[in-house]
Amino acid sequence: MQLRNIKVPSQQVSFLEAVRIGLGEQQGLFFPDSWPKLEVETLLAQPFAKRSAAILQALIGDELPEAELSALVAEAFAFGAPLAAVTEDVACLELFHGPTLAFKDFGGRFMARALMASQQRSGVTNTTIVTATSGDTGAAVAHAFYQRPGAEVVILFPKGKISVLQEKLFTTLGKNIHTLAVDGDFDQCQALVKEVFNDRDLVKRLNINSANSINISRLFAQICYYFEAVAQVPADKRHNIVISVPSGNFGNVTAGLIAKVLGLPIKRMIAATNANDTVPRYWQSGDWQVKPTVATLSNAMDVSAPNNWPRVEDLLAQGVIQRSDLVTTMVDEEDTQLAMRQLAQLGYLSEPHAAVAYRALKRELQPDEFGIFLGTAHPAKFKEQVENILGNPIALPPALAAVAGEASLAVDMAADFVELRKVLLSLEK
């Protein structure tokens, strides 16, 4: 398939080139100009991995042979995404059953394998992955690339602004995983990654790539679990599905909108943010005004300048979605805690990010509609917060229990590009 750079349309690349490059010229995102229409009913009857391979084959084309892509997807998606009933008309799509207990496992694992396939074809033997995380991306990327030959991974995260258990999942690995605790917020971490890509000499020298959701492979992988969600909805309720997404960098919302473009019967999407509400304010006023990022209970969504928003705008410009397909709303801290308690009363244990999505869904859901909200992380990743709000202890699943007592290997760093550049050059082979 051909992908164009949204900022520099003359730059056109194949899917595997886009995976390898990450960001285009002028930090432009790669994105398709056209979309296949899928036989959705046939796909919904298939198992998750087989269906996902078919969806990705339709998007990617023949760059990866069918057998290779199927094996890659089966390996990447080696865990489920169950739809857990909360009430008669509301369910949670649980995306936290992978190795790092968060939705980023789907995109991270698929990207790692797609990147290795791309490098094999281009003759590249070494790459340096530079990525910023507001919580869950770091762990998913770290585990996806851990001890993979030829890959060095550098993860920037805002020091003291993600949960301790989130942090332990990726700062305790070592070997080819290098973690930097940045004195700043996520937007500053993200800005540093963009500065890296502006340094073309550095990018070429170290063959630098990014594993944020700006990479098209991660975005495409996330489309697949929206089909898995709808496949689990009773057939008589599929015509009125509304999906609410806890939104920070807006990759997840973009993936859901693409699923709708491909023919999945989603009536509308809800993008639910926390107090970092740049998009809801813009959606109402037309004025893009980025305010300083504030720390919230839903820390993985503490993003004021979402990187994936240009892709949403591009879908609108292509005419494949309408403004009415997307609702945006902000959920404050009080409502987040209220939603967690409401879910607990219904017998469903949740955490702040999913609670934001649930609260937004309850605001918008009409009587004849079936609502799905995304559970993007296991509640135990936010053990202290959840226990404080709900007043009940949470047992740690094995993946978290194994790292809880481990020492962090992260190195403190100022939000300074010169310092980051030195770190990257120290990894040069």
Image (spheres, rainbow, N blue to C red):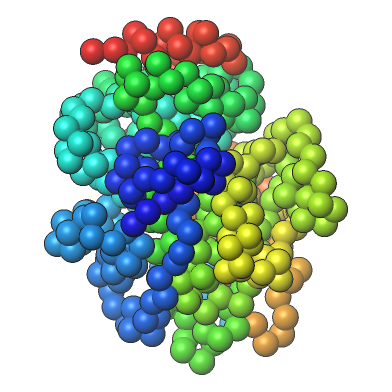
Viewer-proximal residue, 195 or 92? 195
Query: Residue 251 placed where, x, y %?
Result: 53, 50
User: Which residue in the rendered view is the most extreme toward the bottom?
Assistant: 236
Please state the horizontal and vertical placement of residue 103, each as a whole percent of the image.
Answer: 45, 52
| Residue farthest along the right direction in this orientation | 285
Q: Position of residue 11 (x, y in %)?
A: 44, 41
| Image position of 274 with respect to 321: above or below | above
Q: Quadrant of the N terminus?
A: bottom left
Q: Nearer the viewer, residue 251 or 6?
A: 6
Say which residue appears at 45% left-offset and 56% top-offset: 32
Please give the name of the residue rendered at 18% of the width and 27% of the height, measured from the top-left corner.
125
The image quarter containing residue 97 is: bottom left
Depth order, front residue of 266/318: 318
Residue 396 visible at all? no
The C terminus appears in which quarter of the rendering? Answer: top left
Q: Which image quarter: residue 71? A: bottom left
Q: Determine the residue positioned at 50% across, 64% down.
A: 258
Q: Is residue 417 above or below residue 24?
A: above
Whether residue 297 appears in this view of the structure is yes
In the displayed structure, does residue 126 sit left or right of residue 374? left
In this view, 112 is above or below 206: below
- Left or right: 31 as drawn, with respect to 129: right
Residue beneath the point at 64% across and 82% down = 369
Rendered image quadrant of residue 160 = top right
Label tally:
0
Residue placed furthest toward the front: 10
